[in-house]
Image (cartoon, rainbow, N blue to C red):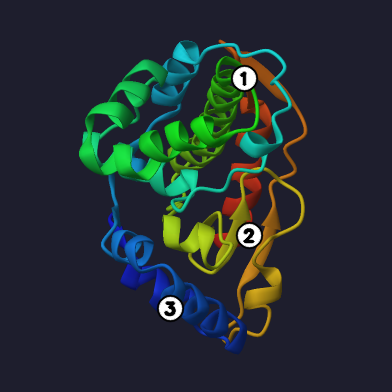
Amino acid sequence: MTTTAMDVRRIFNVTQETRFHFNGWFRKRDRVVEHVMAHHADAIHRVTPQDVAEACRTTPRTGPPPDIVDIRDWRPEFAFTYVAHHVVETLGRLPGWDEFREFCEADDKTRSMLWTPAKEAIEDARADKSVARKAMHHKVVADFTAFLRDTFVLSVLREHGLDVRVHPLADVVFNVDAWVERLILNPRGGPQRSEALLVHAMPPFFFHDLALTESEHVGAVALPARRQIDQAARRLRAVLYPE
């Protein structure tokens, strides 16, 4: 189930809007472009709901974040989704929080993507450094938690036999969170980010709202309710494979 950046480009870079979006991204961020275009999504497609649940149980409770504007508005060169996907593929599995944090510090590439820029942002923040550090911790934990939530939803869909694919290029450049064949999915529900970019594609893409409104806690993480994801999977199968 390996998905490459070239696969993503072949599937989604097919409209005037997506070509404009991709070309603008490709020109501006050389280091990011090199990393993302070389990325292969494979291990992420093998993550199970049980793997996600185990990671959730390791994720710390953070409480309300300190409101430090410089940290809240911090936008590093590498979006968190790039970092998370890189860690999963390098390790070959989904890590828990402690392993993720340790890997970000120890691995040269990941350190340059997240650890070092985060330390620099803390140093540059116009706030007490201990408070800025707490705010950064909260921000990264929140991003990690969001990644776990999305990964959980998609892993459950795969358990139902749906070939759900993801790739950071699709996410950040084409605004596609996940897809199955020509069906675009948003694991968080709600409006589709990619619709404006892909609406003129031929053959057309279709957009599906998973309608996930309920949650249940696993450790400190509120995951979408398994019952609703199972229902969504059955609806998807009915759409994709009508009898």
Circle 3 SS class = helix
Q: Is residue 119 depicted above or below 169 in this figure?
A: above
For label 1, the SS is: loop
Secondary structure of the residue carrying tag 2 is: helix
Give the class, few, some or many, for how many residues have Cα within 10 Å of label 1's Cα (few <14, many ≥20). few
Q: CA distance from mark 2 to mark 1?
A: 54 Å
Q: Is residue 237 left or right of residue 29?
A: right
Asked if the residue at tag 3 contacts the one at tag 2, i.e. Cβ–Cβ closer than 8 Å, the answer is: no
What residue did someone put label 3 on? 27
Asked if disc 3 and disc 1 are in contact, CB closer than 8 Å, the reply is no
Viewer-nearest residue: 224 or 196: 196
Amino acid type, mark 2: Val
Residue type highlighted by circle 1: Asp
Residue at image location 50% in from the left, 31% down from the top: 123
Crowd class of label 2 (few under 14; some 14 to 19; many from 20; radius 10 Å): few
Where residue 215 appears, x then y in whole percent? Answer: 70, 24
Q: Where 76 falls versus 37 (above or below)?
A: above
Q: Which mark is residue 128?
A: 1
Q: Is residue 180 visible?
A: no
**Place of residue 143 in the rendered image (x, y in percent of width and height, measured from the top left):** 55, 34
Residue 100 spot, x, y in % from top left: 35, 26
